[in-house]
Structures are given as C-alpha cells and as structure tokens.
Amino acid sequence: MDMKVWNDLNDVLITNILFHPTGAIFEQNAIRDDEVFQLAISDLSLNDDILQSERITHSIKLIEPNNPFQAVQEACELMNQGILALVSSTGCAAANALQSLTDAMHIPHLFIQRNGDGTPRAECQLNPSPDGERYTLAARPPVRLNDVMITLVSELRWHKFIVFYDSEYDVRGLRGFLDQASRMGLDVSLQQVDRNVTKVFSTLFSTMRMEELNRYRDTLRRAILLLSPRTAQVFIHQVLETNLASKDSHWVYANEVTTVLFLLLKSFSHSPFSLQSFFDQSSITISSSISQLATWDSDRGLNGSLRENRAEHGMQGITLKVVTLLEEPFVMVAENILGQPKSYKGFSIDVLDALAKILGFKYEMYQVADGKYGSPQANGSWNGMIGELIGKRADVAISAITITPERENVVDFSKRYLDYSVGILMTKTEERLNIFSLLAPFDLAVWACIAAAIPVVGVMVFLLRRVQSVRSQNPPGPHQPASVMTSFQSAIWIVYGAFVQQGGESFMSSVALRIAMGSWWLFTLIVCSSYTANLAAYLTVSRMDNAVRTFQDLSKQTELSYGTVRDSAVFEYFRVKGTNPLEQDSTFAELWRTINKNQGQDNSVTSPAEGIRKVKRDPYAFLWDMAVLEYAALTDDDCTLVVTGNSMSSKGYGLALQHGSPYRDLFSQKILDLQEKGDLDILKQKWWPRKGRCDLDKHAEPQPEGRALRLHSFAGVFCILAAGLLLACLVAALESWWNGPRCQRAQPKEDKEVNLEQVHQRMSGLMEDDLAHKQLPGQSLEISALDMGSMRPHQSSRETMRDFPPGGLSVTSFLQEGPGVGRVPGRSLPLPLSSSTLPPSMRCKHRAPNGGLFRQSPVKTPMPISYQAVPGGPIPEAIDPSHGTSI
C-alpha cells in the first residue's frame, strides 16, 4: 500500500479546514450504498477524536451499472466542484476508468467493492499507474460466504440445487463457489429473478407444459436465495401460492440484514416449512419458533449439526393417509370383524407393516374411487392413486404400482421392493389325440409321391430283368474273362449294398438293373433318415406344454387373441414401443395393433380380474404383471393356467409419495435394510410359494428326461398292421375260392392223365422265357417217374447256372398204375423226343400247378422237341418251386 496515498488522504480528512468537500459515485442499483455513505460521513463528523472543529461535506452521483463513460463524466463534474477525495463503489470497468482519472489528477480515490460483510464478489484487477504512484485504494472484505455455502451443501448432502439471484447481485462473485461445486460433482443451476416476481410466475404457467412445471417443481426443493429482502419476501410468497413448494422444500437465504427474517415470517404460514439463513455466520430454523442449529466461523468452520432434528430418526406419532387398490396378492381385503374398520392383507401390506414397525408411524388406508393406478389425462391432470397424491388427499399410495418416468415427474417413489416384469397368462394346451400322428413328419404330397414311386420303380425293375434275360445268352467279351468281370462287379456291388444298408445279392448281374436298384436303395435310405429326423423333431415339439413362450411367438401366432388392461402402465408401454418409428423390431408394432384393436375395446380389458376370467373362458392370452399372474396360476382351482415370462424393462414396485415428501428417504433406507436382511425374500416366499396348490416349475422349467411315447401316438401303426393282416386273410380266402371249386370237375380220387402236348408247350415256354441262350446236351434229357411227395422246394432260387455242376434234365412223370406200367424212376428218354419213343398205350398223369388237381386226357401225338446240349448244367427253373409243373 502506497504510504503517500494514505498521507494525502489524512491531509484531506484531518486538516484544520472547516469544510472538506468529498465526492462519491455509486451505481443506481445499489440503493443502500448512498445511505451507508451518508451515515459514515455523519458519524465521522461527529467524532471529536478525529475531527474537532472540522466538517466534511459530500456530493453523491449515481450512474448506470457497468457504464464507465458515465462514471468518468460524473467524476469530472465533481472535480470541477473542488472535491479533495473520491469514494466509489462500482463495477470493475467503471473502477478502472476512475482509477486512471484520479491517478492523472492526483486525487485520492477509495474504491469499495459492493456488498460488504463477506458477500461474494469477484476481485477487480485494477490497472497499474504509468508513473508508479497509485492514488487508488481498493478495499474488499474477505469472501467467506462461499466457504459457508460449500459447508452447508456438504452437510445437507445436496447433489442438485438451484441458486436464485436478483439484478442487484453481482453473480461474478460466485465464480469460486461454482468452481468448487463443480469439482465436488454437484449439479448447480443459476436463475435470475426480476423485480416483478409475480410476472415471472405467471409467465412460467403460460409458457411451460405440465411436465416441465413438474421438473421445475422438483428443482425448487433445494435452493439458495441471493435476493434482496423485499424480492425474497415476494418470491417466497409467490412460490407458496402457486404450489411450487412442498413440505420437503429446503431453502437457504443469504443476506446481510438479519431483520429480514421477520419479514419473511409475516409473508406466509406453512408450519412444516423449513427455512435456513445465515446471518453473521449463524444458521436458524423457522417453524412456529426460531432456534439456532449451528454457528460458523472462519477458523473452526461449522460448529454443530444441521441434521440434528431431521425426521430420519423416527416417525413416532405420525399418522399417514394411505390410498390403495385391490390387486392380488399385493393388496386384498382380509376377513373383517363386524363393527371393526376394514382391514387388508397382502404382500404390499406386509411391507408397509414392517416399515411402520421400524419407523413407528401409523396409517389409515382407503381404496381409490376410480379403481385405477394413475395415468395422465388430456387436460394435464392425473387419475387414480397418482391423482390422489397430487391432490394431497393421500400421503402414500401402495399396491402393485410400478415406478415409471412419467409418474416420477409428478410424485416421488421409494426404492423398489420387488422387481417387475411382464408375463403372458394362458391356459394349458390340451393334448390332441391323433392316431396317425406318425404320418405328420411328411406332407401329404410327399406321401403321395412315395406311394407313386413304388409301382414305377417296380415296373422299371421288371423291364430291366426282362432285358437282362434276353441279353444273358451273349457270353462275355473276349477281352475279359467272365469270372474276372463277375467277381469285380460283385465286389463293388457288395460294398455299395453295405453302404445303403441293403444286401449284395448277386442275382442282379445286369449293370442297368443294379443302377436302378441302387438308386432306389439310396432313395429309401434318404427318405427313411429324413423321416426319422423329422419324427424326432415333431415329437419334441409336440411334448412342449405351450408353443408361445415370448412376445415374438405371441405376435406370430393367430390362434390366440391377446390384450392387457386399458390405461395401465403395461398398456402405455406397448403404445410407446409400438408407435416408435425408430423401433426396428416389428414385434411390438404387431402386438400394439392387436392390443389396441378398436381403441382397445376388442382385446383389452378394464381390470386384471376380468383378464384372468377371459383367459379361462376364451382362447385368450393376458399380458400383465408377472407377480400377479404367477399368484393367479398358483391359486387356480383347476390348475389349468400357465405363465411364461418375458422381461420388459428394469422396473420395479415401490411406494408412491407426494412430490417432495420428507418420508421418501426414510422409506428407501428401511427397504434396503429389509432387502439386506432377507426379510423381503421371506415375505415373497409367503405369497409366491413355488410348490403351492399348482406347480409353476412343471411348466416353466424343461423336463430333465424325455417323456415316453403314449399308445395313441403309435395307434396308427397298429391300425396299419391290422389292416394289412385283414387284407392278407381276405386275399387268401379269395385265392382259395378261385382255385378250389372251379377245377374240381371229376372225382377227387381219380387219377388224371398227362397231356404230352401240354408237356411240350410247358417245356417250350420255359426255354423261351429264361433259357433261350442255353444249349442242353443230348444225353442230359431224362424223363423219370418220381413221387410228387418227394419233391421239396429249393431255397436257393437266386443262384446262377454256373453255381451248379452239369447234370441231366430230370423230368418227373406220374404214370398210370397198371399192368406193365409202374413207377420207374430215372427212365431215360432218347433224343430227339418224339411220339415214337413212347409206348402206344402209355397214359400220363399231370399234376396241375396248384399241386392238387388232375386232368385225364388221351395221349396225343406230341410235336418233336429238339434240344441243344449246353455246358451250363441243369436248368435253374427245374429246381425253382415257382414253376410248379412236373412231368
């Protein structure tokens, strides 16, 4: 500090001059600065210790805020009046201009920053004097209120609050406070209040929507007022009149005048309202009386606690009004005693009783008149229990009420005491009896194609075998021995037959026939494998209790109609999701179209009880709170209800309270304590037992082991088997009828003669059908008379001719028993066979192909039969039982 300045100032003030003219410059918005200056001058003039016979005169000029040009003009006018010193209290810009002027004119200048007594104000950085001699003395009290406010918000645990200031306050003084609050992670808002406070609030209601006003109301719960006494009085009065403040509002008023407190007490009457103010670094509470909570000084800080008398230490003696809505199992009417008030029971009631026991409060409960939880109306109001809280007719609302952002804008919620999700309630799927369910893996068209393929392939195989029999007379080519070619083909054929799970029989020597049969075998292998796989999948799906398990399944099916309760939180959720153009999943759009069909009149209901009844009565799925649906399924008389879950969002059930209720934090803290101790789990198990009258786990969890197939699933197979057996019996009866009476034209015991002409035709037919390419040796033709009973069908009917050693052609004949004719086996017939070789009187007996019927005919002269000998051995058809003709 420049000593020359002080010496000059003392020369002015304490010289033996009768009058000492002094000038002062203040801003117009500093109404009380001129009064304080005049009071100081008067006290100084009357102080004989300082001024004995001298007097100080003064001249005051008012300027506009932040107008340095006007400040210089007024200072020049004062200097023309002959002032000896200048006192100013202006902004930093005007102070710098006055400093330059007074330094140039060598006039002492006392610059006092506005709002003394520790009120925050930024320090002005004055310009240095060009010659090094400064005539300006800047006086600024220490800024202590910033530290006081930081201590306050820390003690009260504020995280979000607003600071109101008027036009008379220099907000730049809050720079240090805002910086420190930002480092602490606090959310601080600044709001300037005009002098016309009434106009401010009328503008709020005319420009803001209801949701914005609710958010603004929540902001007003925590506030610091940096207002003049008159502005603060009007501001508080308007806040209370417009219902923007609540019982939980907590305001801090900072002003240098202590008596403003009594002005505020006269402006409103709200007994639970709490107001704190710092006057001379002290904190007091206003209700019906005034008491000091704590003091603060710069050395020791806060002395005491601001939380000493807060309600969180108990709610003894408080009776709350509770509104509720009947919703099983949250709130239900208990068995009432005649003459006693209506009592309630349920999960939510148990939670409320536990809180009342811990905190010590009592409650009175009543049911909401319209039976709704609460939703916004077109005029901005709310119905249901939320409307009861907004209208302050109830303190707490409890039932199956969910915490949503829309509701939190108008009321407060405690911490959730139960998680929330949306479930789908349906009836159990009735098991349908279908004896032909094993045909379900293939479509009808597939079965028709398989049935058509069987005769087509059969005809193709028949034709290929005929072609094979014609071409078999050609021997193998000269370049490759027959045995080598046959062995190689057989080896490949056996390997392929094993691959397709068939046999490798060698009777199909034709390549074309093998290709046809190989294709058929591969076809049957693929068909059987596909049928097995599809049958397993079909049986797995059919074992599921219900095909609808998610919202996606529900939106894709068309058998069930579905809906929810109109004007409920679930209804609103599907509306928002279904009408959101940014929602990429079309599931919610389809769900909303069905739920809101005909404005919700077709599929939605008015209450959860109606929805549950509709599920049991109609093919209907009800979307509602999972907890409510599980209780309905557990207590169902027939146990025909099934619930499938689909988590909708991370919501929960909570206690709704009035906006700004002082009991919110108490309830939230005690609910967390109940969760930590496990008391809420015990209560939940009481109302949602997993093993109740009906078992929810039976349908909610997959079965660990597969369920055995029942008889009705295989009844179709047994029916097909029975039909086949009946058809076989019918065909056997028809064959017996066809081959029986028609051929019995003679006595049953009469022997029949064989017609050699027929023998000739039969032999010729055999040769033409299968052995046209064979050469029979001349010495191998032998006609023998054998007993027909000694003949047995040969089992190996598919071997080739090469598998048998050469031998004679044996023809069995039954000759007439008589003189000179007997059964002589092995009688050889000379070749060529002609009628001259037979005795004239020989009569032959011929057994018909059916093995039992004979026909007697005279011997006719047969046609000569010519045979060629072949080295291939006997004719395979001679030992094939399918050719039932014997000679």
Image (spheres, rainbow, N blue to C red):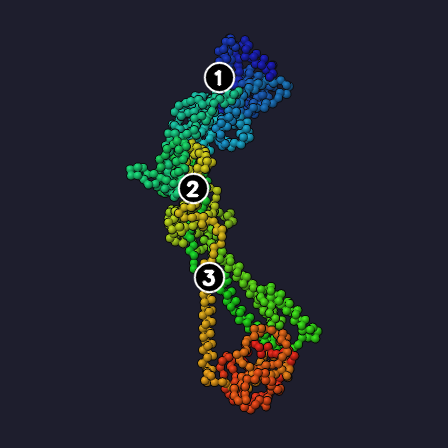
> Which mark is on residue 38?
1
424 in relation to 804, above or below: above
Quarter of the image with the C terminus is bottom right
Compared across the picture, whether 130 is left or right of 459 comes to right
| Residue under the point 60% across and 83% down | 782
Q: Amino acid at mark 2?
A: Gln
| Residue under the point 45% across and 23% down | 293
Mark nearest the camera among 2 and 1 is 2
The kind of secondary structure element at disc 2 is: helix
- Across and down, in percent, residue 535 comes to 50, 59
Residue 228 visible here:
no
User: On the image, numbered disc 3 is attached to which residue?
Assistant: 714
> Which mark is on residue 58?
none
Q: Nearer the viewer, residue 344 or 799?
A: 799
Q: Are marks 3 and 2 in contact (CB under 8 Å)?
A: no
User: On the image, numbered disc 2 is attached to which residue?
Assistant: 685
Compared across the picture, whether 284 is left or right of 779 comes to left
Residue 743 visible here:
yes
Q: Earlier in the sequence, mark 2 or mark 1?
A: 1
The kind of secondary structure element at disc 3 is: helix
The kind of secondary structure element at disc 1 is: helix
Q: Earlier in the sequence, mark 3 or mark 2?
A: 2
Bin the neighbour count of mark 3 within 10 Å (Cα to Cα): few under 14, some 14-19, many 20 and up.
some
Compared across the picture, whether 871 is left or right of 654 comes to right
Quarter of the image with the N terminus is top right
501 in relation to 836, above or below: above
The span from disc 3 to disc 2 (Cα, nearest Å) is: 43 Å
The span from disc 2 to disc 1 (Cα, nearest Å) is: 78 Å
861 in relation to 716, above or below: below
- Across and down, in percent, residue 361 comes to 38, 32
Mark nearest the camera among 3 and 2 is 3
- Across and down, in percent, residue 187 comes to 51, 32
